[in-house]
Image (tube, grey):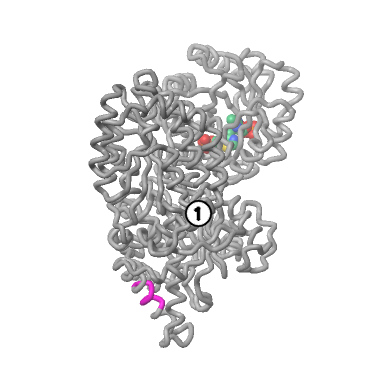
Amino acid sequence: MPKHEVDYSLYLVTDSTPAILGDADICSVVEAALKGGVTCVQYRDKTSDTGVLVSTGRKLHEITKKYKIPLLINDRIDVALAVGCEGVHIGQDDLDLPTARKILGEDAIVGVTVSNIAEAEAATKGGADYLGIGTVFATSTKENTKSIIGVEGLQEILLKIAAENWPVKTVCIGGINASNVSRVVWQSSGKGKSLDGVAVVSAIMAAKDPEAASKELLQLVKSPPAFAKSVVSAGQQKRSPQELLSLVPYIIKTVNSKKPLSHNMTNLVVQNFAANVALSVGASPIMANYGEEAKDLAKLGGALVINMGTVTPDGLTNYLKALKAYNDAGQPVVYDPVGAGATAVRRSAVKSILGGGYVDVLKGNQSEILSCVPGGSNIQQRGVDSESGNQNLQELGSAIKELARLRRHIVVMTGKTDLVTAGESVFAIENGHEYLGMVTGTGCCLGTTISAAIAAHPNDKLAATISAVLYYGIAAELAAERPDVKGPGTFVPAFIDELYNVRKATVKGDLEWLKRAKVTVTGQKFARFSTMADKPQRHFQRPAVFVCDMQEKFRSAIWKFDLILRTTQKVLRAAKILDVPIIVTTQNGTKLGPTVSELQELTADAVVNADKTAFSMLRVPEIAARFPRADPTGAAGPLPSEVAIVGIETHICVTQTALDLLERGHKVYVLADGVSSCNEMDARVAFARLRAAGAVITTSESWLYECMGDAGIPQFRDVAKLVKETGPGMKEVLKGLISNL
Ligand SMILES: Cc1ncc(COP(=O)(O)OP(=O)(O)O)c(N)n1
Ligand SMILES: Cc1ncsc1CCOP(=O)(O)O
């Protein structure tokens, strides 16, 4: 097998010690593991003499050859030569890489252990085929490990490899097993960086059934963990503050109606305060610090808050148990690293928690968040200034953006200006009051408020988090302004009241409070919340584009498919310019193929991209959740969306989607130059039906101009340019598709 084709997905490293192998036979264990799907094997035997190493190595090679899987020898180049196997794995203290390469030749596979960027660079430049990155987690299999690097150390090395485009494969090693493998693989991928596989010893060599263990591990390597299904998408991050503001009432109302569980593992000082805040914001609090309970609690659809304000060794064990339980259940977690940089114990607790699971939201003040930057932050802690052009605010924004990207979660940095990011835009929120900083526990209770919002909105955690921060800050302003509030002491009960009052007002449709919102993308002007009565910035308040089932298999069957494809491309390009969310579906993708290749890149940022079997796109739960029953006043539901539909087939999926949207009170634009059916007549009849049902049948160009509403909007020039560029082609589309409708 050419070495560039080696699959490192599940790399078995053997161990012959009784503590791991027991009395099993190494060859039988390796063969069982190969049957289970192991993709690469390393013979690692630290105790046998050379004769045994060579004879066992030869036996193992006979077996691995049968499965067409490469065999490597740990440390010993002489043994690898004697066995005639595919290569070696060398550590930092073994024979050097150039010598190994010289002896074994270019065709041999040479892997090198690395635990930091400098070692990774030297090994890559020295011609290593792959890097064994570790030790990730402490493991009893190898006690004399130089450094435990955690998932963060692993991520840092992978990021560097991606940034430098180093041509080297990567596996991680150390403490990898079925309970953490999909998380580690997932946390190590994204933004160009990824692992090629994982290396394990005890998870297979010590397993009762090595074949079953290998099968399970391989499956876990290839499947994302439960919590990955609802991470913030690129499309969600591109929304404007205005768009996010318009979601706040809906988010607060959903917390009110769902009453989600807010499971607080919080410090001794704020237990009571946090429980009362949870009740005021409409959540159902449980203050449960015993980790064993978390498995059951995680099944109740809520969110977990880990607040390490009064951390203890027992507390840490309990946090890690709860974190795992919520991760396994795919339920969200907020982590508040209280006092993170203050003591060595807390610094180590931060590492354990961030390395021990996935947190959806990391929330803390400036110094706490900067203490969570791997390797420490270079930013001088000067205090957050409110000016949008402020240098420090920009710097802090960049630091938390990096942090959010690295861990693929949301970061909330509180201060005079609160900053929120999921790795792209940094949203700055300037609501709140100085009393918040004069009362113990207000920061902690923001974590509780965020937990309620993300539990109620697991599919849009960014909007939920921003809503929670705004709601909390504005309630504080309202409380501080009350005549009965004389200082921090009287502020506390008033604040709890105002959290309650704002929620109740929102449920009744009174959104006056939200006009105080000051949210912006750092460096830009504040967005203002506008009700429908205020002058909208864009003609359409809540536009969206639905791309229905534009799949490979339909290409030849659909009447004028190539023409509707051109329209779809134009509409999607315009949607990107206008920041209009894109929703995509495929119908029975395994059978009918993916979305056509021409639309892959244009739909990469779609806020939903789902496969379905039902004909209506609204039957996809994720889409249905985004387009619930609307209310034109915004009082009894979100404001109506204005949805443009392109895709196929006009008389089936497009029709059913349009009817479902209309039934939920949304406005529907069916773009006649962007939809089609196999049979032209079916499409014509469908148009008549849709028009009668209240849909607007129009052209893409008309919809785009209506969507913009005003040539004064900043995006107008780009959209007009796009329309002009595609003009001649579109004439053909219109003639071909709708001249005879
Ligand atoms: C795939 C893989 N990665 C790392 C190691 C560790 O090798 P080394 O540093 O030489 O330590 P020992 O294995 O000799 O204890 C490995 N063996 N395989
Ligand atoms: C060989 C090696 N190198 C770093 S950790 C390790 C042992 C990994 O063993 P396990 O998979 O049982 O944790």
Q: Residue at x 45, y 73 (%)?
A: 269
Which residue is painted at 50% across and 72% down in the image?
A: 432
Residue occupying the point 48% across, 22% down = 30
Q: Which residue is mark 1?
A: 240
Query: Where residue 620 sits in the image (x, y, percent)?
Result: 31, 40
Side of 73 where 253 appears, left or right: left
x, y (%) of residue 415? 56, 68
Main secondary structure type of the part rendered in magenta? helix
Check the image and report above or below for 444 versus 45: below
Q: Is residue 141 visible?
A: no
The magenta region covers: 495-500
Query: Going by the image, does 229 lie left or right of 282?
Result: right
Front-lying residue, 224 or 201: 224
Does any portion of residue 616 appear in the rendered image?
yes
Q: Quadrant of the N terminus?
A: top right
Q: Which amino acid is tagged 1?
A: Ser
